[in-house]
Image (spheres, helix red, strand yellow):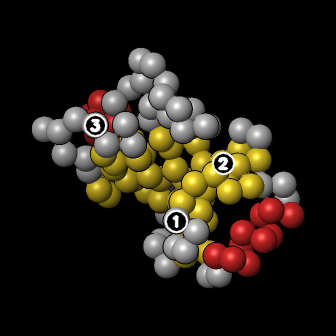
Amino acid sequence: MQLGVFSISLAVKDLPASRAFYEKLGFSGFGGNGKQWLIMKNGDTVIGLFQGMFDKNVLTFNPGWDSNAQLVPGFTDVRELQRQLKASGVALLTEAATDTTGPASFMVVDPDGNPVLVDQHV
């Protein structure tokens, strides 16, 4: 199963302070609105900083994207990934509508309570 590029989405309390901290670790801004959320990169490592949007840190996968948010040819659509997981007995917290195409997402929770978001932007 190919889930796409991985990043950690961090629930932060103070976006400017978190940005300054991760810049000291070599990350630079890559996307976002800079007010509530910011995507940062260091090489191929991607993190998202989200203020007031998530209660917990979230493991995030983006089908169809590489670490530069460029299209990956031949990727597995999020709805197919969802179907495979459901067939394997994985309970979904949220689901992508199966009668759509393009951007969609679903969320599962691992056995330790960690949210896992599969979020397709293409």
Looking at the image, tell me whether mark 3 or mark 2 is earlier in sequence order. Answer: 2
Q: CA distance from mark 3 to mark 2?
A: 22 Å
On screen, residue 15 versus residue 91, left or right, reads right
* Residue at the spot of label 3: 102
Q: Amino acid at mark 1?
A: Asn
Check whether the beta carbons of the residues at disc 3 and disc 2 lie within 8 A of each other.
Answer: no
Q: CA distance from mark 3 to mark 1?
A: 22 Å
Q: Is residue 8 above or below residue 11?
A: above
Dot 3: few (<14), some (14–19), or many (≥20) neighbours within 10 Å?
few
Q: Say which mark, if any, is on residue 117.
A: none
Report x, y in % for residue 60: 52, 50
Q: Residue at 38% x, 26% y: name it.
A: 76
Looking at the image, tell me whether mark 1 or mark 2 is earlier in sequence order. Answer: 1
On screen, residue 105 versus residue 40, left or right, reads left
* Location of residue 40 (image quadrant): bottom right
Q: CA distance from mark 1 to mark 2?
A: 16 Å
* Location of residue 89 (image quadrant): top left
Dot 2: few (<14), some (14–19), or many (≥20) neighbours within 10 Å?
many
Report x, y in % for residue 30: 64, 51
At mark 1, the secondary structure is: loop
Q: Say which mark, if any, is on residue 33.
A: 1
At mark 3, the secondary structure is: loop
Looking at the image, tell me whether mark 3 or mark 1 is earlier in sequence order. Answer: 1
Q: Nearer the viewer, residue 37 or 74?
A: 37
